[in-house]
Image (spheres, rainbow, N blue to C red):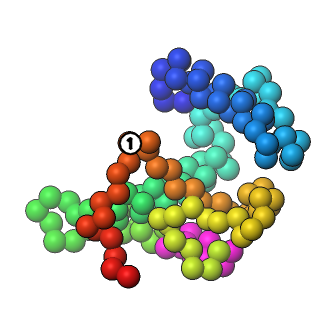
């Protein structure tokens, strides 16, 4: 994990504490501290693929698909490739979640069990000091 040992320890403690929440207890999910480990995703093919997928989503969420190199009219080839990957991934997500919106958290469709049962879940993480700019909101 790319942070200080103290912050990494806090994060691991947070993960362990999740088992004390109502939903984890109901699902009988236990998280043992010795089962949380750091790994290098470059040494694990499945995790490397996950990095690519998450990177494509992050790329789109942060509007990096619009970035053009300085003094250029066109976007770079890697930018175009990442956007194509995002669109391909989104196509598959839309088969599971029609009308998928990358800018919001996927709902539970009225059932908490869907958090564990759905093959894809998408969360929008919002910082605590976040303030919405109402002037950029779409009109109703």
The quadrant holding residue 95 is bottom right
Image position of 52 (left or right of 138): right
Mark 1 neighbour class, 10 Å CA radius: few under 14, some 14 to 19, many 20 or more:
few
Residue located at (33% from left, 80% from top): 139
Where is 52 relative to 101, above or below?
above
User: Residue 84: percent from the left, percent from the top?
Assistant: 45, 72
Of 88 and 122, nearer the camera is: 122
Q: Which residues are magenta?
A: 87-96
Q: In this orientation, which residue lies closer to the viewer: 2 or 75?
A: 2
Quarter holding the N terminus is: top right
- The residue identified by callout 1 is 129
The quarter in which the C terminus is drawn is: bottom left
Q: How many marks?
A: 1
Percent position of residue 14, x then y:
65, 30
**Above or below, 107 relative to 34:** below
Q: Residue at x 30, y 60 (%)?
A: 133
* Res 51 visible: yes
Q: Quadrant of residue 90?
A: bottom right
Residue located 22% across and 71% down the image: 74
> Looking at this view, is 41 or 94 the one in front?
94
53 vs 128, left or right, is: right
Instruction: Answer with the quarter of the image where residue 42 lies.
Output: top right
In the displayed structure, 12 sits above or below 24; it is above
- Residue at x 14% of width, y 58% of height: 70
- Image location of residue 100, percent across then percent down: 56, 74
**Residue 110 image point, x, y percent:** 74, 68
The residue positioned farthest toward the top in the image shown: 6
Relative to the observer, which residue lies in front, 125 or 94? Answer: 125
């Amino acid at each position: 994990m790319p942070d200080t040992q103290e912050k990494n320890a806090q994060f691991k403690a947070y993960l362990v504490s999740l088992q004390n929440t109502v939903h984890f207890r109901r699902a009988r999910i236990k998280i043992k501290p010795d089962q949380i480990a750091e790994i290098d995703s470059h040494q694990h093919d499945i995790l490397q693929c996950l990095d690519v997928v998450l990177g494509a989503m992050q790329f789109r969420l942060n509007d990096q698909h619009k970035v053009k190199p300085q003094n250029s009219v066109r976007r770079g080839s890697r930018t175009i490739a990442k956007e194509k990957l995002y669109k391909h991934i989104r196509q598959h997500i839309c088969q599971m979640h029609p009308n998928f919106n990358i800018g919001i958290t996927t709902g539970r469709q009225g059932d908490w069990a869907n958090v564990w049962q759905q093959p894809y879940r998408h969360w929008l993480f919002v910082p605590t000091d976040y303030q919405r700019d109402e002037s950029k909101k779409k009109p109703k």
